[in-house]
Image (cartoon, helix red, strand yellow):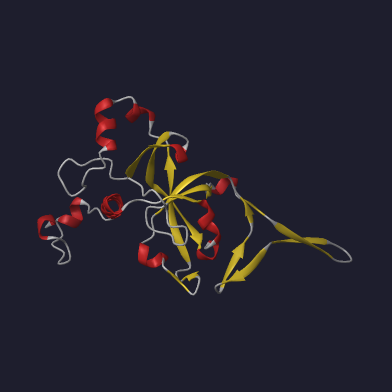
Amino acid sequence: MFVDVADQLNLRQGDILRDTVFPVLSHSEVKFFVEAKSSEHSLTFRVSEKHERKAPLYFAHIPVRIGFAAVISQCCDLEPHNGHIQQPTFALARLVPIPEGIAKDESQLRHLRANSDPRLPDSGFLNMFHIPQRGALEDKEWIIDFSSVFCVPSREYPGIMSQKILQMDDDNRIRFKIRLMASFGRFTKEEQASGHPWLPAESK
């Protein structure tokens, strides 16, 4: 699934990163940092902020997880120019353990491990991509969870290259791209019945 020697100069779709900080955005648990300002008669507080890209940026304390993540941004968007990635951010998806229910069901587990072509009938687990057991991944099997996605500022490159541990080979990167596309690009029954001219003929 992975090349023997990963390119340590460039990011590619499907790359696996270690020690990635993943924010868990629960609004009830977000605590904003404030700045105190004293005057002769009172002490006032305001939320800490700075302006970045013409919009306010606030500072907050939030719960996070740390673990493996896969790059899901398109390879072309990750290509550096003059040492910088041109897009303002790039997207990652978390690697999570195989759900217990699937792990205990031999039929479902076999189906998950197949990473089957989502364009074929009865292809399942479209929100996941199976990653086999590997030493660099704690000798465990994982899934790339397409429903757990977050963005990283592109200024993290090239520093983030030190966290790149695996790079998919061409065959599996193509499979990954197609499954990712199918996961985010599925049509509802109402959309399929709409007769939209952009839909594939078989979907109309």
Q: Position of residue 79 (x, y in %)?
A: 41, 67
The residue sitting at 16% across, 62% down in the picture is: 199
x and y percentages locating residue 99 in the rendered image: 38, 32
- Relative placement, left or right, of 23 versus 140 is right
In terms of image quadrants, where is residue 38? bottom right
Is residue 20 shown above or below 59? Answer: above
Q: Seen in the image, is 195 located left or right of residue 124?
A: left
Q: Residue sitting at 68 percent across and 62 percent down? A: 48
Residue in the picture at 41% in, 51% down: 5
Task: Report the residue at 56% width, 60% height from top.
Answer: 159
The foreground one among 203 and 95 is: 95
Q: Residue 134 occupies which quadrant of the picture?
A: top left
Residue sitting nearer the eye, 70 or 158: 158
Which residue reaches farthest right? 40
- Disc tally is 0
For residue 191, which quarter of the picture? bottom left
- For the C terminus, give its image quadrant: bottom left
The x, y position of residue 105, in whole percent, is 29, 25
* Residue 155 x, y percent position in the rendering: 54, 65
Q: Could you tell whether 158 is left or right of 140 in the image?
A: right
Report the quarter where the N terminus lies: top left
